[in-house]
Amino acid sequence: MLALVVIVVCSALGQWQLTRMQEKRAMLDAVEAVLEARVPVPLARAADAGRARDYDWAEGRGHFVDGKPWVLDNQIRDGQAGLRIFRLFVPDDGAPLLVDLGWTPIVDRSARLPAAAIVAGDGLAGETMDLRGLLLPPPSSGLALGPALQEGATFLMTRVDMPAVASAAGVSGLAPRVLRLDPAIALGQARDLDVLPNTLPPEKHLGYAVQWFGLALAALVTALVLSFRTRRR
């Protein structure tokens, strides 16, 4: 009975890993197609709830909101811990949205704050400018434990919770997607168009699936051997 439970659990976990692998491969294929074509859509498309999980290359004109930056904690880049910086941007023809300005290393590990220039606004607020980049869903939140954000010199986020961001910012109609700025734009911090930061690539999921199915097979073989020995006695 125990062996059966182990086989069922391991097989289910292996199948879940295969499903995640397929989902991420489909996501990477969709992003690759968008980046190859780079046919721009208006930034207003970010507010389209029907495309909340999709990807678009977008561009538009607007301005950054004069307020505190939104800082996503525990972001790894090239093996180094850091923070991902977001700011609210209001397009001329659309709803407010979060713009991903890139990654910065942790300067003060006790306060976990980015550089003072970013906290102060980096001269972005109020200036009308043209932006372009990849519209994509916010970073995966993983296990939603504890409050989503904490207000101080910045809004320090453990995950990007759009309703919590909208409430803290006092805005309505916040777009469900964020804009990852084109790295060619001389603005913000270190960034790229990698859509799988801080998460497993498809190959890792395949490796874990093989491990789980291997454990299920080992449990099956062990159960058969023990059953055979018992019958011989």
Image (cartoon, helix red, strand yellow):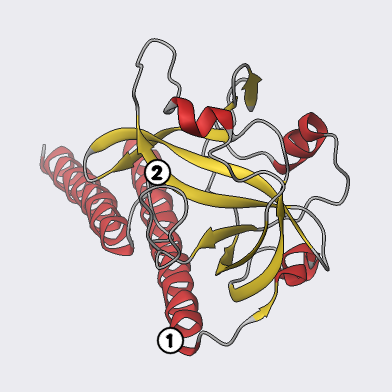
> Where does the image place residue 114, in percent across and percent down from the top left?
43, 28
Could you tell me which quadrant the C terminus lies in? Answer: top left
Residue at 50% across / 34% down in the picture? 118
Residue 154, percent from left and from top: 59, 25
Q: What residue is at 21 percent from the left and 53 percent from the top?
A: 214
Q: Position of residue 210 (x, y in %)?
A: 24, 58
Is residue 147 at all visible to an observer of this figure? no
Tell me the residue that label 2 is attached to. Answer: 103
Of mark 2 and mark 1, the one earlier in the sequence is 1
Q: Secondary structure at mark 2?
A: strand
Amino acid at dot 1: Glu
At a point 62% along the width and 44% down the height, the residue shown is 87
Is residue 222 shown above or below 55?
above
- Give the answer, above or below, for where 36 lies relative to 134: below
In the rendered image of this protein, does residue 116 appear above or below residue 40? above
Check contact, mark 2 vs mark 1: CB within 8 A: no
What kind of residue is marked 2?
Trp
How far separated are the C-alphas under marks 2 and 1? 24 Å
Q: Position of residue 7 (x, y in %)?
A: 34, 47
